[in-house]
Image (cartoon, rainbow, N blue to C red):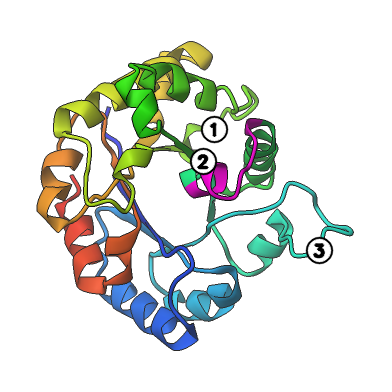
Amino acid sequence: MARTSFVAGNWKMNTNKATAVELAKAVAKGAPTRVDVGVAPPFVYLHAVGQALAGSKVLLGAQDVYFEKNGAFTGEISVEMLKDLGVRFCLTGHSERRHVIGESSALVARKAEAVYAGGLILIHCVGEKLEQRDANQTLQVVQAQLNELSRKMDDPARMVIAYEPVWAIGTGRNATDQQAQEVHAFIRQTLGTMWNKDYADRVRIQYGGSMKPENAKSLTSQTDVDGGLIGGAALKADAFLAIVNAAK
């Protein structure tokens, strides 16, 4: 089944207001129409970046969210707040939230449910650490993280999975084409079991581990790789757009 590739830039805790706007404008100007493109700036620049993207096809995204709608949750941001700023997609389960911030699987699941229930596109991140890969636990880890998703999430157009091997994020290492395809195929097979084959065939699965212009074409040419979740390379418009243009 033909799927439109989706390449999203996760800017993490980088940029200031001026550089965020400059980067957003450059991406909006150079993004092709045949690939879905999105950027996820820091919370404090969502409004400014949203204005810079106005009139373009580039989707505005958020890096995180809290699962409650409102209340006494100091420092947190709700789905409704994100939607009020024009946010279209949101990440959950990013490895840095899991392994640096210390989010539990239960918390990740509640956030994913809130994103989907709120009508946003969910980019749910899964992936193993180096010691888990070395112990041949990759598929078990990915399976457990996919189980954080509710079977009520029945619209494949709003479900995106990002496979990000933790050992390949920001390290300059990346999974080989074969390693990426193996896990992506497993994810699609698992989604077929959790929902059904038609659903699984429609879900886009991004690769998110040190994808760069030099390896983007070979990675995205794999059968089950439908774009990328880009970190460091997303902070430079030329590099990010080269990845976008390499996507099938």
Q: Name the residue that disc number 3 marks.
A: 74
Nearer to us in this view, 226 or 20: 20
Q: Secondary structure at mark 3?
A: loop
- Disc 2 to disc 1: CB gap under 8 Å: yes
Q: How packed is label 1: few (under 14 Cα within 10 Å), some, or many (20 or more)?
A: few
Give above or below for 22 relative to 247. below
Query: What residue lies at 28% left-to-right and 51% top-to-bottom?
Result: 171
Q: Secondary structure at mark 1?
A: loop
Query: What residue lies at 73% left-to-right and 46% top-to-bottom?
Result: 67
Q: Is 103 contained in the magenta span?
A: yes
Amino acid type of the residue that numbered disc 2 sits on in the rendered structure: Arg
Q: Is residue 121 left or right of residue 163?
A: right
Which mark is drawn over residue 158? 2
Q: Which residues make up the magenta segment?
A: 96-105
In the picture, which quadrant includes the C terminus?
top left
Find residue 167 and report its horizontal and vertical position in percent: 33, 40
